Image: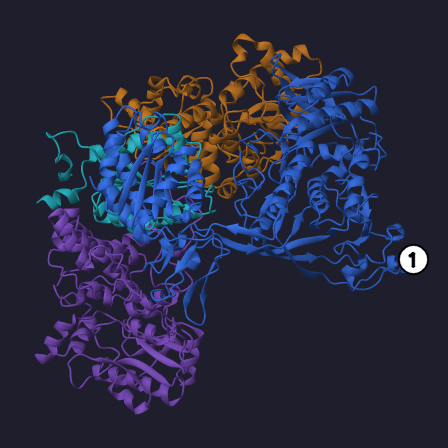
Chain colours: A orange, B purple, C blue, D cyan
Amino acid sequence: MRVPYFPGCSLKDFADNFEKSAFASASVLGVELVELPEWYCCGVVAPLEEDELIRKVAPARNFLRTKELGGNKLVTLCSMCYNTLKLTNLYMKKNPDKLERINSFMDEEENYDGTVEVIHFLELLRDIVGFEKMREKVKKPLKGLKVAPYYGCLLLRPKEVAIDSLEKPTVMEDLLKSLGAEIVNSPLKKTCCGSYQVINNKEVASKLVYKIITAVTKRGGEAVVTSCPLCHYNLDSLQKDLSDKYPGYKEVPVFYFTQLMALAFGLEEEVLGLEKHEVNPLNLLKSKGLI
Amino acid sequence: MEGAFLESNPENKGNIKKIKESVNRFLQQLLEKKVVEWVLTPYINPENPLPERRIITKPEEAIKADPLTPVIPGFPMSTFVSEITREKPISKPLAVLLKPCEAASLVELVKFRQANLDNLLTIGVDCYGSYHVLDFKKMVEEGEKPFERMINALKNNKGDELFRTACKTCLKPVAENTDLNVGIIGVNNLFIQANTSKGTETLKKIGLKIVENKERDQKIKELIEERGEKRKGMFKEFLKELHGLHKLNKFFEDCINCHNCMEVCPICFCKECFFESELHPYVYEKYIKFTIEEGTIQELEGKLQFHLGRLIHMSTSCVSCGLCEQACPQEIKLFKLCGPVSENVQKSFNYRAGEKLEETPPITTFYEEDLGLTEKQAE
Amino acid sequence: MRVGVFVCHCGRNIAGTLNIEKIKEEVAKHSGVVHVEDYIFMCSDPGQKLIRDRIKEKNLDAVVVSACSPSLHEKTFRNNAASVGLNPYKVEIANIREWASWPHEGKPEEATEKAIKIIKATVEKVKSNIPLEPLSVPVTRKVLVIGGGIAGIQASLDIANAGLEVYLVEKKPSIGGKMAQFSETFPTLDCPQCIETPKMTEVANHPNIHLYAYSEVVDVSGFVGNFKVKVKRKATYVDWNKCTGCSECAKVCPVKVSSEYDVGVSQRKAIYIMFPQAVPNKATIDPEHCLRLVYGKGCGLCAKTCPAGAINFEQKEKIEEIDVGAIIVATGFDVMDPSLLTEYGGGKYKDVISALQFERILAPSGPTGGKVVRPSDGKEPKTVVFVQCAGSRDPEHYMPYCSKVCCMYTAKQALLYKHAVPNGHAYVFYIDVRTDGKGYEEFYERVLREAEATYLRGKVAEIYKEDGKLKVLGVDTLTGKGVEINADLVVLATAAVPSEGIKELAKVLRIQTDEYGWLKEAHLKLRPLETATSGIFIAGAAQFIRDITDTVSHASGAAAKALSLLSRNRIEREPLVAEVNEEICSGCGNCVEACTYQAIKIDPETNIAKINTALCEGCGACQASCPSAAIQLTNSYKKQLFEMISILAKE
Amino acid sequence: MAEKSVEEGKEKFEPVIVGFFCRWCTSEAADLAGTIRLQYPPNIRPIRVMCSGFIDPIYVLKAFLEGADGVLIGGCHLGECHYINGNYKAQTRVKVIKEVMKSLGLEEERLRLEWISTSEGLKFAEVANEFTEQIRRMGPNPLKKLKRE
C-alpha cells in the first residue's frame, strides 16, 4: 500500500528518528509512506485564522500534491501538522466559497476540490492496517516494559478532528498492547505539555512536565510514549533540569510510538535514533532485554 | 432457489411442444389434486390470434391454456385479479398466472388495497420478452409462431429486436414475489420454482420432487446484468430525447387525449381519474371559455397536465410494464417517458415498485428525516 | 353568487402605498363581485356597521375583507357578519397589509397589482366556501395527571379543589417526586418535609382525587374532551387495603438493595416503603429482588410477620380503563448519571457523587441523619469541591443547555455543608453564577459570606486519585492560573435530563419531544403549557428543568388550562375537517397513512375511507395524498385552490 | 439553456412566483416581515394553506401550467410542524415532483421548498429576494414561449 505522506519541519530536523522509525516499521506492515514531492509548511497556527485565506494556500498546495500522487488520503506523523492540515481541510470543505477564493490565489495550479482526507499515522494503523496484523509482525514483544501513553492536545481537540474519544482515548493503548507492552494509565495523558511556552516561559512548561512525568512514575511507569515532536521535545529535554530542582526526581525516557514499533518488529537499532534522546533510554531497554 | 423439474425424460429436453404440454399438465394437476378450484390464465382463443384470459375450473380445460404466450393482450392480468378480489377476497382457491411485470403490479395493487391475496396461489411465468399485440397478430396471420420465436431467442440468448421496448430493458424476467414460478430461463426442462412455503406445499401436494437449482439462479443473474447495461444506455438516450419542455411538447404532439394509457395502466386504480374529474379544468366547456376569454384553447396545458400529473401519481409505483405504450393508438413511445422517469423517482427513494410486499410506497412512507431538499443547489 | 369586497385603508398603512381606487375598479370587474367599498378603518365600529349594513342592503352571500392578516381580525369580521345572519365561514380575509402594502412601500404600482391578485383569489375561494356550524363535542369533565411530583400534586389539588375529579398516576410507590429527596430548599431553606408533605397528605385524603401510585399509563386513545386511558396498576404483592404501613415486613426482609430514594447512598429491603412520609404509606415488594418471587418458593418472612396479613405473592398487575377530558403531563426530570462523566471519575471513585446524592447526605431525614460523611469510608470530608455545569453547557460532550437550578442548589449545598462541617472548606467551580429569581441573588451573597466558599470561575479538566486524595485539576480563568485541589469529596452538579421513559410516554400520548426528550410545547412563548395535541398540557420540569417556585406556578397554570377547557359540558371545534366523496373513493388507504391523528379508517364493509371528524385536526395532509380528489378539506377544496392558482399564476 | 434569453433586449423580466405558505409558520413569518417593514420584491403571490403537508403536487404542476415562473413552498422547520409531521410529508411529495422535473429537464430549480418559522421574518424576506432573483436570472417559464410559437 502506497500512501502519500506529509513530513513537516520537525521530522526533517530534531525529530528525524520519528520519521525513520515510522518508515522502517511501516514497510514491515507493507505500507509505503510516499513523501509529497514538493511540500510546504503545514502552516502551524496561522491557517486556523478563519479570514486569513492567503495562509491557507500552503495547505491547499499540499493537498494538490497529494492528489498528484494519486491518493485521496494524506498521512502525517507530527500531531501538530495533523491538526493544522485537518482543520484547514475541513474549513475548505465546509466553506466552498472560501475554497474558491483560495483557489483563485493559486493561478498556476489546478483547483483543489476538497476531496483529500487527512489522517494521522495512528489512524492508518488502527483503521486500515489493524492492530491484529501488527501483532502478527511482532518479533520481540515489549514484555515487561511499562509504558504510559501520552496524547497531549492535538490528536484529540477540537472534537471534529479527534482521532479517538475525547475523554477516554485508547488508540495508543491498543497499539502498545499489540506490541506486548504493559500499559500504565496516567490521568494526565491529555494534559498540556507546555507547548511553545518552553521558549519564553520555560518555568510553566517545566512544571507541567514535572507533573506529567511524576504522575507516570507514581503509577510504576518506566517510559512515556507520544506522537508529537513538540510534546517529545518538552517532555524529554526539560527533565534534565527537573532532577536538579526536585531531589529524588526519577527520569523516564520518552519514546515515539514508532520507535517502539520498530523495536518490537525487531528492526535494526539504528533506525530508532536513540542517540537523540536527552533522557538516555538505553539502560531501560537493556534491562528489559530489548537491545 | 428450490423447486421441481416437470419433465425428467431427457428426450423431451428443450422440446417446445413439450414445454407447453408440461405447463398445462401442471395446471391440470393443480385442479385434479384440488390444490385450487379455479385457474386464471391466458387461454387460446379460437376466434382470434390473440389469447384471451379465462378462468378454468375443469382439469380437461387446461389443455388449451396458454400461460407462456409472449404477449399481454390489452389489460394486465393484475387488473383482472384486482377486479375479482378488490371488494372481498375470493371464496375458492384460485391460481393465477402472471408475467413478472404483472406480478409486480399486483404487489403494488395489494399495497394500495386494490387486490387481496387471500385464497390466491400466484404463479409467475418467466418472461424472456413479449411482443406488441399488433406484431403478435401479424406474426400469427403470416404463419410465424411467436412462442417458438421467443423460445429460440431465449435459447440463443440473443434477444429479439421485435420485443417491446419495455421487455428489451426489463430487469424482471423472473417474478420475485409469487408463490411459484414457471421457469423457462436458465433451464433445459421446465422448472417450477417455489418461492414461498405455500409454493413448496403445492409442489409436494402434486407429488413433485423438490431440488436445489443454483444454475438457474446464475443464469438469471447474468441475464439481468446484461439487460441492466443495455437499459442504462437506452434510458439515457430516452431522457435526452425528452429533455426540456420543447421536446416534451413535440413528444406529445400526436396525443389525442384518449387516456388509453391511463386505462390500461395497472397502477392507475382510481375509480375516477383526477384528470377526468370535474375539477380538471381542461374539459370541453372550459376550452370554450378559454377560447372566448383568451383567444386560445389550452390544449397544450391539458395534455401536459394529464401526462405529467399522471407521472407524479404513478411514477413511484410504476413497474415498467410498458402497456401504456402498447395501448397508445397514436404510437407515442410512452415507455420512453415513464420507464426512465419512474426509475429515477424510485431510485431517489431507494424503492423498487413491486419487489416486496412489506415495503411501503414512497408516498405513503413517512420519512422522519431531512431529505435535504432545502439545501441550496448549485446553480 | 353575490360577493361584497370591503377594502380597508388602515389609515395610511394600506392606502399610503396601494392605489385604493384602482383596486376597487379592478375587483369590481371580477365575476361574482356585486359590491366594492372602502373605508378608513374597517375594524372600527363604523367600519363593521358599514359591512353589516351592506350585507343586508345588497343581500350579499359572501364577503371578502381586504385588510390586515387574518390572524388579527378574521374572528372579528366573521362574528360581525354572523350577527346579521351571514354564515361566518362565508367571510374571508385578503391580507393586503402585511403581504402587500407594508413590504413593498417603494413600489406602489406592483404592490397594488399584487393586492388585486390576492383579493381576486380570495373572492374565488369565498365563492366556493360552504356555510358551516362549529362542531360541538361532549366532554368528560375529569382530568388525568401523570406524575406525582410537586407539579403533579399542585395541578391535581388545584383541579380537585375546583370540583373536578382527578386521576393522579405515579409510577413509583409513593408520590413526592424529586422534591421529597431534597434536604432543604433554596432560597428560604424550608425543608420539603415541612412544605411538601402536607400537600401529599391532602392529595391522599382529597375526595376528588383518585391516586394511582405504582401505576403507568400504557395507552391513550380518543381526543380532546374524550380521552380513553389505560392505566397499568403494577403488582405490589401487598394488599394496600390491608397494609397499615407499619414497616414490620421490611425489618425481617433479608434482602438488601441499593435505595432509589437515597440515590444509592443507603440500602432498602426487597419489601419496602419508599420513605417514612410516603404517600400512600404502603409497602411494596420489588419482584426483581424478592427471594420468594424470584425463586417461586421459600422465604416469605414478610408474610409470616405482617400483622395485617396483607402480603399476597399471587397478586397480578391489572389494566384499568378511565375516561378523562384533559391530560396533564407532569413527569419531571432526572439527573444525568455521573458515571457518564468519565473525566471526573464519575462512577469510578466512590467519593465523586452527584448533587442529588449529596442532597440525601445533607438531609436531616437522610440515611446519615444529616451528618456529612463521604461514601467511601464514612469520614467527614474537610475539603469539598463542587463542580457546576457537569454535563451542562457543554455542546461538545453532553448537553448544550444550562440546567438552570444548579447554581442555586450548589450555593445552598455549600452553605449547608458549612453549617454541618464548620471547619471544612468548599470550592465551587462555575462558568457563570446565575441567580435569576426572587431572593436568589441575596441568597447567593449570603452563601459567599457565610459559607466562605471559594468560587473559582473555570472548568474542571480532570479528577483522579493520587495519594489517597481526589486530585481536582482545573483552571481559574479570572487569574489565568491552573488550580489543583486535593479534595475529600467531589459533588458534581450533573445536568438535568428528561425523565426516563418520557419518549415512550410521549408516543403513547401522541405528543412531541425535543431532541433531548423534553416535552415540546405548542409555542415556546405564547403556549408554553399546551402541547400540539389539544387537551394535553404540560406541567413543571417535564417541559424543561425549572425550580420549585416555577414548577408550582407552571403546574397551577396547566391546571387552569385544563379547567378552562372543561368549564362547560360541551366544547366547540373548528368545522374545517376532511370529507370523503364515497362515489370516487377507491379505498387505497393513502389518506390513512397520511393522517397523523388516526382520524381515517377504511370501512371494511364498503372499502371506503371514513373520517372520525372528532379526531380530524384539519391539516389536509389526506387530500394531498389522494390521487383522485376523493378526500378533500372543507373550504379548502381542490377546486378553490385551482381557481386561486389560476388567478395568481397569470401575468 | 435556450429558453433563458427570451426576454433579453426587451424590458426587464418580472417573474411571477406562486407561494404556498403554511398558516402556522411561513404565513406568520410573511406577516412579521411586513410588520417590521422588510422590503422584498412583490413578485411572490401567496396562498395561505393549512400546512405544507396540505400541498398536493398537482397544485405545483397547475401553477406552472398556468404560467408561473416559479413556485415557493414554505413550511415549519422539520420537527416543528403544528400538525406534528406535515412538513415531512411535504418534502416527500416535493421530492417526487422534483425528481420528475429533473428527469425531464424541466428546470426543477423553479420549485423551491423552504422551512421558515414564525419568528423568521428576515429569512422570509431573504428567501423572497433571493428566489425572485434566481427566477429572474432563469428567465420566463418556457411554456409561455411555447404558447406564443
Element class at badge 1: loop
The reply, left or right, for residue B337 in relation to residue C126 is: left
- Residue shown at 40%/55% (left/top)? C622
Location of residue C240 in the rendering, given as x and y in whole percent from the top left corner: 81, 56
Tell which residue pokes out farthest to the top in this image: A200
Location of residue B47 in the rendering, given as x and y in whole percent from the top left corner: 16, 85
Location of residue C581 in the rendering, given as x and y in whole percent from the top left corner: 36, 63
Location of residue B50 in the rendering, given as x and y in whole percent from the top left corner: 17, 79
Chain on which label 1 sits? C
Q: Determine which quarter of the picture holds residue B229.
A: bottom left
Q: Is residue A241 above or below residue B260?
A: above
Q: Is residue A127 above or below residue A40?
A: below
- Residue shown at 33%/48% (left/top)? C59
Q: Is residue A31 visible?
A: no
In this rendered view, identify the residue nearer to me: C645 or B160.
C645
The reply, left or right, for residue D62 in relation to residue D1 is: right
Q: Amino acid at mark 1?
A: Pro
In this rendered view, identify the residue nearer to me: C137 or C631.
C137
Q: Is residue B122 visible?
A: yes
Q: Residues within 10 Å of mark 1 (few under 14, many from 20)?
A: some
Q: In the rendered image, which quarter contains the C terminus of chain C? A: top left
Q: Label 1 belongs to which residue?
A: C307
Q: How many marks?
A: 1
In this rendered view, identify the residue nearer to me: B238 or C175.
C175
Q: Determine which quarter of the picture holds residue B125.
A: bottom left
The reply, left or right, for residue A165 in relation to residue C446 is: left
